[in-house]
Amino acid sequence: MAVDPRGADLKRYLHEDPGGPVVMLNLLRYAEGGRELYARYAEALSTTFLPRYGAEVLYAGDGSTALVADDGQAWDAVLLVRYPSRESFSRMVADPEYQQVTELRTRALTAAVLQATRAW
């Protein structure tokens, strides 16, 4: 399972932009020792990159009891991150400084879902 967005994914994401803010749903499954690696990534994200691109964490928490899920669908952590636009998210992931720390996220995870959402 992929844990990082690919170039084609980002192009489609920008092409399908309805405008306005976007909340990114992050579902995370950690590799062995991944929680610590992800914590280092999250620190860089919250202190440097989210402020730089006008984004904020709305919610971050550990997964718990899955009430409706097939085997293997439970997640270790859930995050909701609001970006002012899809473009701001795209600029962040293209930032050379961000690309230096995103390898922490890649090494930390064995599976992930990164889904753009918007308010009803």
Image (spheres, rainbow, N blue to C red):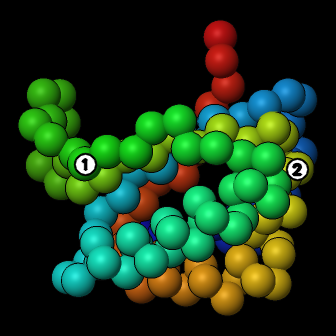
The residue that label 1 is drawn on is 62
Q: Is residue 115 above or below residue 8?
A: above
* Category of crowding for the residue at label 2, using alpha-carbon neighbours closer than 10 angstroms: few (below 14), some (14–19), many (at least 20): some
- The foreground one among 54 and 119 is 54
Foreground tag (2 vs 1) = 1
Marks counted in the figure total 2
Q: Is residue 113 above or below residue 98?
A: above
Judged left or right of residue 115, residue 19 is right
The numbered dot on residue 87 is: 2
Residue 94 visible in this rendered orientation of the protein: yes
Query: Marks 2 and 1: CB-CB under 8 Å?
Result: no
Could you tell me which quadrant the C terminus lies in? top right
The numbered dot on residue 14 is: none
Q: In terms of secondary structure, where does tag 2 sit?
A: helix
Could you tell me which quadrant the N terminus lies in? bottom left
- The foreground one among 94 and 74 is 94
Q: Determine the CA span between mark 2 and mark 1.
A: 28 Å
Q: Position of residue 92 (x, y in %)?
A: 79, 64
